Image: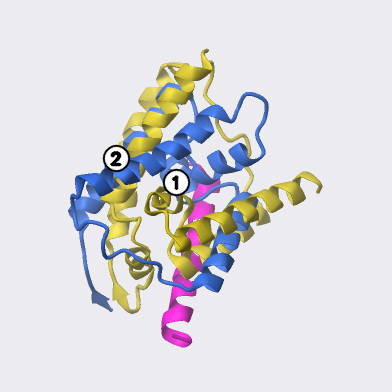
Amino acid sequence: MSNQKQMATALLAGIVFGFGLSVAQMIDPAKVVNFLDVFGTWDPSLAFVMGGGLLVNAIATPWIFKRGKPIVADLFHLPTKKTIDKRIVFGGVLFGIGWGLAGYCPGPMLTSLSFFNADILTIVFAYLVGTWVTKQVLARM
Amino acid sequence: MEIINFTPVSAFIGGGLIGLAAALLMLLNGRVAGISGIVGGALVPAKNDSGWRLMFIVGLVVGGLIYQLLGIGPGVGHIQAVAGTPVLIVAGLLVGIGTTIGSGCTSGHGICGLARMSPRSLVAVLSFMGAAFVTVYITRHLIG
């Protein structure tokens, strides 16, 4: 399948994703931290973001897989690991601490590059460094 | 507990668009819309596997720009970082390290994994949500 077609469709999906994150106001870290602040000034909105996302995706997913193959690629790439190990918990906890400290998970962080200010460039750079170094270390284990 | 700034309608519509985007990427490209996985694969790419990843990331930024240009919702003028530079660096590193070790983030495990009813993703979601709630409790109520 043509690489150009896959790049065009990925661009489209990325635009819808980034626009959706913005509409949901996940690009506002103060709102994200307020969602996480159940015992203080709680803003439950982000539970509705996950609810809306899950609803649409959970309805679409069985229908998509029933087609047998994707439209501009040869096969569905799905995670192969099924085991619940220490890594999934340990990694999740580290990610959760970082998310709670600054209010940015990866999607909103990258979408916020559209603000192009020093704060967002700083956290995105640190995120990329953390990802790259960890991939190097895991590849050698 | 005091509930503030509750915006369920825009949250639900935004979430629906995120779910639609994830469904589009699976239907068209056969790929999971897990942002940390897409980024990780773009940083250390397999052969002929970086083009779609980079375009998806460009799309995220373009989607953010379109929202800003349309000037809908509460706008973006009030948005600013909630932490200083040192904390932003530590937070960024932790998000990168954690999502790489744990094979996913809010989108891959939360929106896609849970939609496929993956038990592994459920454990991941409980781990990062739990840690994030505890972190905010500590920073806002114990040392804040």
Residue furthest top as drawn: A1
Badge 2 sits on which subunit? B
Residue at screen point 66% across, 52% down: A85
A12 magenta-colored = no
- State whether the magenta stretch is mostly helix, strand or loop: helix
Label ID, residue B17:
2
Q: CA distance from mark 2 to mark 1?
A: 12 Å
Mark closest to the chain's N terminus, 2 or 1? 2
Residue furthest right as drawn: A140
Q: What is chain A's hue in the picture?
A: yellow
Inspect the image, locate mark 2, and give the three-letter code of the amino acid beneath it.
Leu
Give the quadrant of the C terminus of chain B. Answer: bottom left
What is the crowding at mark 2: few (fewer than 14 residues within 10 Å), some, or many (at least 20)? many
Local SS, label 1: helix
Residue furthest front as drawn: A117
Along the line of sight, the residue nearer the viewer: A137 or B78? B78
Residue at screen point 38% across, 32% down: A13
Disc 1 designates what residue?
Answer: B107
Give the quadrant of the N terminus of chain B. Answer: bottom left
Q: What is chain B's hue in the picture?
A: blue
Residue at screen point 45% across, 49% down: A110
